[in-house]
Image: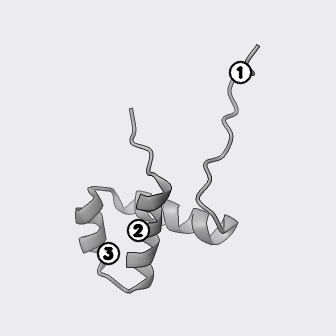
Amino acid sequence: MTKHFTNEEKTQLIALYEANVDKIEILKKFNINNSTLFRVIKGYHEYGNFDRKRGSGRDVL
């Protein structure tokens, strides 16, 4: 199962990235892949928040 980042962790990722901290250092600190970092950044810039999207699975009865 994949790890879901907390809003606090996402805030730290964005803060480090916007402070021009080296990408490699951010990736090592959070033990994440390059694509994960940029997915978090892209989501923040597109939507302005860190909320997870609602699942598209089966509705609860």
- Residue 46, quarter of the rendered image: bottom right
Q: Amino acid at mark 3?
A: Lys
* Farthest residue, direction top: 61
Q: Position of residue 54 (x, y in %)?
A: 68, 40
Please tell me the numbered disc located at residue 23.
3
User: In the rendered picture of this protein, how many numbered marks are placed on residues?
Assistant: 3
Residue drawn at point x = 51 percent, y = 60 percent: 39
* Label 3 SS: helix
The foreground one among 8 and 57 is 8
Q: State which quarter of the image contains the N terminus.
A: top left
Q: Amino acid at mark 2?
A: Leu
- Closest to the camera, between mark 2 and mark 3, is 2
Q: State which quarter of the image contains the C terminus.
A: top right
Dot 2 or dot 1, earlier in sequence = 2
Residue drawn at point x = 68 percent, y = 65 percent: 47
Measured along the vertical axis of the image, is residue 25 above or below residue 28?
below
Q: Amino acid at mark 1?
A: Arg
Distance, label 2 to label 3, CA atoms, is 10 Å
Residue hosting label 1: 58
- Closest to the camera, between mark 2 and mark 1, is 2
Residue drawn at point x = 42 percent, y = 63 percent: 37
* Label 2 SS: helix
Q: Are marks 2 and 3 in contact (CB under 8 Å)?
A: no
Please tell me the numbered disc located at residue 15.
none
Distance, label 3 to label 1, CA atoms, is 38 Å
Residue hosting label 2: 13
* Label 1 SS: loop
Measured along the vertical axis of the image, is residue 40 above or below residue 18?
above
* Farthest residue, direction bottom: 20
The foreground one among 34 and 49 is 49
